[in-house]
Image (cartoon, rainbow, N blue to C red):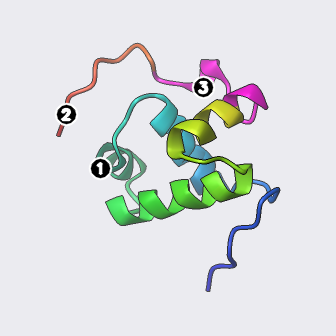
Amino acid sequence: MRSPSVPGQPLTPGQLAALRLAASGYTSRQIAARLGNTTESGVHLRLKEATVRLGARSRTHAVVIALRRRIIRFDDLDLDQPRRVA
């Protein structure tokens, strides 16, 4: 059973991976396909938990906070690839 997310807790590897891909512009469906070990609902849950842990108001705000705190770095993002909407 998962423990509830609490503000200030460190992000899990799965939350970090989902957040990096969200910051790269991927949709939840695309993130699930890239990670391969989760569903679209699982991605939503990971990003929601990351949002709580970071004290953010939205998925976008979570990305901004993570970048500002250097939890994720621009060098880790996949910004050069064109996105196809699935």
Question: Residue 26 location in percent, x, y?
Answer: 37, 36
- Residue in the image at 76% along x and 66% along y: 6
Helix, strand or loop under label 3 = helix
User: Is 13 in the magenta?
Assistant: no
Amino acid type at circle 1 is Arg
Judging by the rendered image, the residue that carries numbered circle 2 is 85
Closest to the camera, between mark 3 and mark 1, is: 1
CA separation in Å, label 2 and label 3: 22 Å
Judging by the rendered image, the residue that carries numbered circle 3 is 76
Camera-side residue of 55 and 69:
55
Question: Residue 31 location in percent, x, y?
Answer: 38, 46
Can you see residue 74?
yes
Instruction: Give me the disc on residue 29.
Output: 1
Amino acid type at circle 3 is Asp
- Left or right: residue 40 compared with residue 44: left
* Magenta-colored span: 67-78
